[in-house]
């Protein structure tokens, strides 16, 4: 293990499930101190700690904190400062939005709430980190999907916030360049998580199994590995970018692919 990766302090917001938890475990696996935030009543802390222990990983610091609550944010950062004295990496993972099933769900308040939870924390947390620690974190990393470019069921507002994040990190990288803060975002194909199924419905899993099309989704481990690598120090030449993890299947998806592989897919 390289010395560059030892004893860093990593904050993962919303890191008790799915992608966030897998990313937190990946950093813990490489010897980093990990802090995970979660929403009120969403988990039992002991369960998360036991999951880490089951993989022989050091237990994370768990902190209940609402990403849009200023008092929660300040309390969280001050606790990290007291315990570790610094914060090296910020993984902005919280995503909360209203499912849009029809035009009746196109509500301004719902859209603004989606932006408040899924976009603004990446900016506000970073600014508050300078106030608390005196310096910014080295890495600020966000998560996205190919929703901004492709239709997904019920995904209108979620896709809009992903697109907004992908634009803003370019500007944030410019504004923070002299502070040596590296902003990047990882865009992935669908990952089978509770969050995805709550959006698409549980029937999605049976549907993709029916046709067994390779590359329909990628694995949590793949997302975690790319996230870790982007914050490892080895990829610092990449800044203000949206990186895509898709196994190359975005290129070969659609009607042409189904046409070519129709016999194999039973179509």
Image: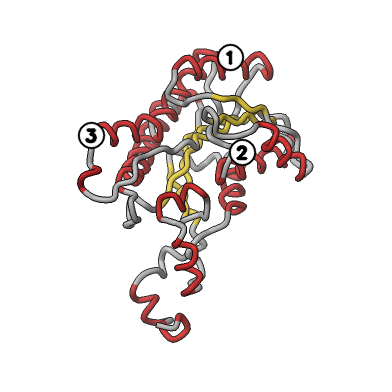
| Label located before the other in sequence (1 or 3) | 1
Q: Please give the label number shown on residue 108.
A: 3
Q: Quadrant of the N terminus?
A: top right
CA–CA distance in space, label 2 to label 1? 26 Å
Q: Observer-nearest residue: 72 or 194?
A: 194
- Determine the image quadrant of residue 9: top right
Residue drawn at x 50%, y 29% is 181
Residue drawn at x 52%, y 30% is 39
Q: Badge 1: how crowded within 10 Å, few (<14), some, or many (20+)?
A: some
The residue that disc 2 covers is 233
Secondary element under disc 1, as helix, strand or loop, is helix
**How was this image coloured?**
secondary structure
Locate residue 95, reporting x and y percent.
44, 38
Q: Nearer the viewer, mark 2 or mark 1?
A: 1
Q: Observer-nearest residue: 216 or 64?
A: 64
Locate residue 16, reporting x and y percent.
59, 38
- Determine the image quadrant of residue 63: top right
Secondary element under disc 2, as helix, strand or loop, is loop
Q: Nearer the viewer, mark 1 or mark 3?
A: 3
| Label located before the other in sequence (2 or 1) | 1
| Label located before the other in sequence (2 or 3) | 3
Secondary element under disc 3, as helix, strand or loop, is helix
Q: Badge 2: how crowded within 10 Å, few (<14), some, or many (20+)?
A: few
The residue that disc 1 covers is 78
Q: Nearer the viewer, mark 2 or mark 3?
A: 3
Locate residue 194, reporting x and y percent.
51, 49
Q: Residue furthest right?
A: 56
Locate residue 68, reporting x and y percent.
42, 24
Question: Taking 55 as reference, is 124 left or right?
Answer: left
């Amino acid at each position: 293990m390289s010395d560059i990766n030892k004893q860093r302090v990593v904050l993962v917001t919303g890191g008790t499930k799915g992608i966030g938890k897998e990313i937190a475990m990946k950093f813990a696996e490489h010897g980093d101190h990990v802090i995970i935030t979660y929403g009120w009543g969403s988990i039992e802390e002991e369960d998360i700690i036991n999951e880490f222990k089951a993989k022989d990983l050091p237990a994370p610091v768990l902190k209940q904190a609402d990403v849009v609550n200023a008092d929660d944010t300040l309390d969280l950062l001050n606790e990290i400062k007291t315990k570790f004295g610094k914060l090296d990496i910020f993984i902005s993972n919280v995503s909360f939005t209203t499912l849009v099933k029809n035009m009746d769900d196109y509500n301004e308040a719902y859209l603004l709430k989606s932006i408040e939870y899924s976009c603004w924390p990446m900016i506000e947390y970073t600014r508050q980190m300078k106030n608390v620690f005196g310096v910014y974190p080295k890495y600020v990393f966000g998560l996205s999907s190919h929703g901004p470019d492709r239709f997904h069921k019920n995904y209108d507002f979620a896709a809009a916030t992903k697109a907004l994040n992908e634009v803003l990190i370019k500007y944030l990288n410019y504004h923070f360049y002299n502070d040596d803060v590296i902003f990047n975002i990882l865009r992935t194909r669908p990952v089978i998580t509770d969050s995805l199924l709550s959006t698409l419905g549980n029937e999605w899993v049976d549907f993709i199994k029916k046709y067994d099309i390779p590359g329909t989704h990628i694995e949590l481990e793949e997302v975690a590995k790319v996230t870790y690598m982007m914050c490892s120090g080895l990829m610092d030449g990449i800044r203000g970018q949206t990186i895509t993890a898709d196994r190359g299947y975005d290129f070969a998806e659609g009607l042409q692919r189904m046409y070519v592989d129709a016999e194999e897919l039973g179509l």
